Amino acid sequence: MDALTGHFTTIRVLGEGGFGIVKLVKSRKDGQLFAVKSFKQTSKTAQALQLAEKEIALLKTLAHPNIVGFHGMGFDQKERYIILEYCAGGDLRSMIHDAASQREPIPHHRIQSIFCQMLLALHYCHHSYKGLRQTLLHRDLKPENVLLNAAGQVKLADFGLAKVMANGLTVTTSFVGTSGYLPPELVAGQPYDHKADIFNLGCILFELCTLRIPDHALRGVQRAREFLLPVGHSAQMNSLVPMLLSIESSNNNGAPEHHLVKSPCSCAATVKVWGSIR
């Protein structure tokens, strides 16, 4: 019996792609459920394995209630695998897709809760990771990479493209991310920092509210109209979305959106304004 199946029983496949496969497994010892990401070791998957090793190294150092938990790693029949916390609630992409298919908007209070939890996770990455000396950039924040556990708690996942840098420095113009969620600095080939994650946070917030990706090409009055949210969202939410997605303020260190994750007090104030995290 190999190492993985010796400790776990496979229940079903959760997802599959060019990199490998994600399975739901149950511990033979205590019945606890986990998600196992497996990467085949072949010449075609060398890059995926490289990202997997990078993700493993980072996840081992992360400890936050809104970041997916790391429970182990290993090799099994020429495969590299990572054992992660199982998030039974799926991801935000599925939530958005289901809401759009049913033509039912996501409740305002639920969006508030999700946003606050993502904000707290990013604050930890940007300002609490290994103290004040280093900043962790996620660099691929999108609905597919924001998971939910059975209780609906947000779990930020997929740190394969993340980058650790000295606090206060900008990173190179390496082109990573997903179309529609790329910040203006990256599209223009300029250096960027943790504010790129904040821009992505704004994209997710907009999509949760409108069930579509924002059109970043619009300017002036058209841009202002683009960011108007549907009826039912608060004044705070309507002011927050354009603030997070503001191209004009993206290079301004004093921009109000960046103060949201600059200190624990800012996060606490946000949670206080929008209610306790569910």
Image (spheres, grey):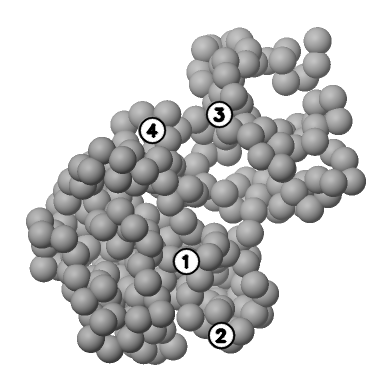
The residue carrying pointer 2 sits among few (fewer than 14), some (14 to 19) or many (20 or more) residues within 10 Å by Cα, namely few
User: Who's the residue at 76% across and 32% down the image?
Assistant: 74
Where's the C terminus, which quadrant?
Answer: top left
Kind of residue at disc 2: Ala
Q: Earlier in the sequence, mark 4 or mark 1?
A: 4
Task: Name the spot of residue 268 as percent of width and height, x first.
Answer: 24, 61
Does the residue at mark 2 contact the one at mark 1 (Cβ under 8 Å)? no
User: Who's the residue at 79% across and 53% down the image?
Assistant: 47
Does the residue at mark 1 contact the one at mark 3 (Cβ under 8 Å)? no
Query: What numbered label is drawn on residue 188?
Result: 2
User: Who's the residue at 10% across and 56% down the image?
Assistant: 232
Q: Which residue is mark 1?
A: 180
The residue carrying pointer 4 sits among few (fewer than 14), some (14 to 19) or many (20 or more) residues within 10 Å by Cα, namely some
Q: Earlier in the sequence, mark 3 or mark 2?
A: 3
Total labels drawn: 4
Q: Quick check: can you spot residue 120? A: no
Kind of residue at disc 3: Leu
Q: Nearer the viewer, mark 4 or mark 1?
A: 1
Q: Observer-nearest residue: 206 or 117? A: 206
Q: Nearer the viewer, mark 1 or mark 3?
A: 1
